Image: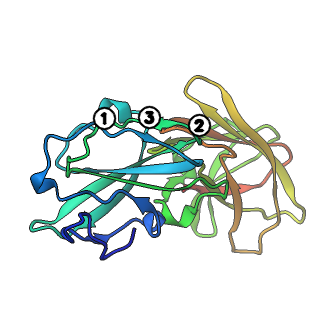
């Protein structure tokens, strides 16, 4: 798959814009559908572990029910037919030997099917939207105080076990990066626990994090991740002090 490639064997309706992940992907080129019948249901057997992508014309309000297990990538394919068509891209990982029956038809021009080899490489976080959460809007235990640090409002830990908790939301199943902006005015590295909890109170991930001293008037960044793929939904991220008295938190970025 590449920009300039035609969707049909007649050379019509070329791709003009693709999500970065689809460049070089395998995809299904359609026959000249003008002479086709009503079509037959698409049924594919996956020969190797793969990530399958299905583009759905944005004129379709509801995706086929068999695709309910697919995640919305929040990206789009654009084609240059007589009137530009836009396809929202959904994805799901399949293992070798799996059967894909997405509930669409071979002659239905409102869908695009593509696939790439499955990979265990960490997602390219810089291709995803970043959502920022300010510390002053997070839930804080009574010992934490709101102060102005480095010219910005921040939440400052005062006691061991002080807890700062953000409510975060994700729109697609994936592994997310977590970046916390902080200032540590102490001369030594401090320690805290980072916990990810779902809506059913399940602890999905917990890690001990080290926050090194920051230069006077400057912010440092703690880079972490959810540690596992999480579904679209709402979660809580807790930062719990172990010996972080005096640590100031400005905000959290989720990508």
Distance CA(mark 1)–CA(mark 3):
12 Å
| Mark toward the viewer: 1 or 3 | 1
Near-viewer residue (74 or 178): 74
Q: Which residue is mark 3?
A: 69
Quadrant of image for the C terminus: bottom right
What is the x, y in percent for residue 61? 20, 40
The residue positioned 20% from the left and 52% from the top of the image is: 109
Q: Which residue is mark 2?
A: 236
What is the x, y in percent for residue 215? 77, 75
Side of 80 relative to 163 (left or right): left
What is the x, y in percent for residue 21? 48, 64
| Mark toward the viewer: 1 or 2 | 1
Distance CA(mark 2)–CA(mark 3):
24 Å
Above or below residue 26? Residue 241 is above
Quadrant of image for the N terminus: bottom left
Q: Which residue is mark 1?
A: 103
């Amino acid at each position: 798959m590449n920009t300039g490639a035609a969707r049909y064997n007649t050379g019509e309706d070329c791709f003009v814009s693709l999500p970065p992940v689809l460049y070089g992907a395998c995809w299904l080129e359609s026959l000249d559908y003008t002479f086709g019948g009503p079509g037959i249901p698409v049924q594919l057997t996956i020969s190797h572990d793969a990530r399958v992508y299905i583009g759905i014309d944005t004129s379709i309000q509801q995706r086929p029910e068999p695709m309910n297990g697919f995640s919305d990538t929040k990206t789009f394919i654009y084609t240059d037919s007589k009137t530009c068509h836009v396809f929202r891209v959904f994805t799901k990982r399949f293992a070798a030997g799996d059967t894909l029956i997405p509930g669409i038809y071979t002659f239905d021009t409102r869908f695009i099917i593509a696939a790439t080899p499955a990979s265990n490489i960490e997602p390219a976080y810089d291709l995803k939207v970043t959502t920022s959460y300010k510390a002053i809007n997070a839930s804080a235990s009574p010992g934490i105080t709101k102060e102005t640090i480095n010219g910005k409002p921040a939440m400052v830990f005062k006691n061991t076990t002080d807890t700062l908790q953000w409510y975060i939301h994700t729109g697609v199943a994936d592994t997310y990066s977590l970046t916390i902006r902080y200032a540590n005015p102490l001369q030594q590295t401090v320690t805290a626990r980072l916990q990810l909890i779902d809506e059913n109170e399940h602890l999905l991930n917990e890690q001990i994090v080290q926050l090194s001293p920051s230069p006077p008037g400057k912010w440092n960044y703690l880079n972490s991740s959810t540690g596992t793929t999480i579904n679209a939904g709402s979660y809580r991220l807790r930062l719990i002090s172990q010996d972080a008295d005096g640590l100031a938190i400005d905000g959290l970025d989720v990508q």
